[in-house]
Amino acid sequence: MKPNNTKIKVKNLNFFYGKKQALFDISMDIYENQVTGLIGPSGCGKSTFLRCLNRMNDLILDTRVQGEVYLDNKNIFDPDVDVVELRRKVGMVFQKPNPFPKSIFENVAYGLRVQGIKDKEQIAQRVEESLQRAALWDDVKDRLNESAMGLSGGQQQRLCIARAIAVQPEVLLMDEPASALDPIATRKIEELIFELKKNFTIVIVTHNMQQAARIADYTGFFLMGKLIEMDKTEVIFTKPNKKETEEYITGRFG
């Protein structure tokens, strides 16, 4: 049975880079407090689709979008939508950790200051809470004023997650957040995602099918810019409806 609490509803989404169409008629429901995994071969449109959900593609020249994406029943492409506020609600964590060349503390506090929060106690509390939630507090609590660049790759990625959640988004988009990490750091990120879904709706692009099988509640399979199939993860991995899905899952291509 599917949950009835749809957080994001995508309807007939098409996306173009110039004349080249990258996404074709994508429709899907993304459920609240669930992890939705997006799998498929490289270049199949997963990351492009992910960036549509918080309009990051607006930053790329000569792109256009058709269709609708509803966040809590409001179309994010409506002309009256404040894109800055949308990106606060729909945070993003990228493939490669991208901490700012600032202290650990200032990395997490950055978004709060941008929001205009000036109360030092409130900022300190939110920074600590975010680092706790990102399972990083114990590692860094004695070195908050040191540069974030001194952290390991896995710690930097958890710091970027802390930075994303500090502004209290509702949705967290993750674009292959563990692909640059070793297996131990990857496991920590996966455990973290499992914890974070209690508070956030998570959409994760992963090239690692085992990772999707481990952490996603729902999985969508993309191929050549189309959503071939989407269902509960165990269905996608054990009884897919489409031949293309089965061939990809069993390693016959991709």
Image (cartoon, grey):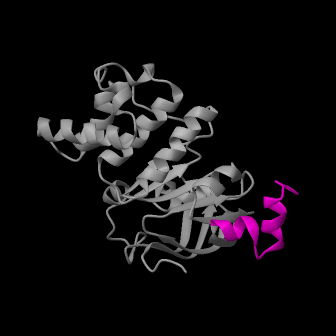
Residue 249 highlighted magenta (yes or no): yes
| 135 in relation to 151, above or below | below
Residue plotted at (37% across, 41% down): 162
Asked whether residue 93 is in view, the answer is no
Residue plotted at (48% across, 64% down): 34
Q: Position of residue 205 (x, y in %)?
A: 60, 53
Give the left or right position of residue 90, taking residue 191 as reference.
left
Give the left or right position of residue 202, taking residue 218 as reference.
left
Residue plotted at (24% across, 43% down): 112
Q: Nearer the viewer, residue 60 or 219?
A: 219
Asked whether residue 188 is in view, the answer is yes
Q: Position of residue 76 (x, y in %)?
A: 41, 69
Residue plotted at (74% across, 63% down): 223
What is the quadrant of residue 89 in the picture? bottom left
Residue 85 highlighted magenta (yes or no): no
Q: Position of residue 33 (x, y in %)?
A: 43, 64
Please state, as top left, top right, bottom left or bottom right, where the N terminus lies in the image.
bottom right
What is the quadrant of residue 159 in the picture? top left
Q: Position of residue 179 (x, y in %)?
A: 63, 40
Give the left or right position of residue 9, taking residue 123 as reference.
right
- Residues rendered magenta in the picture: 233-254
Give the left or right position of residue 182, taking residue 252 as reference.
left
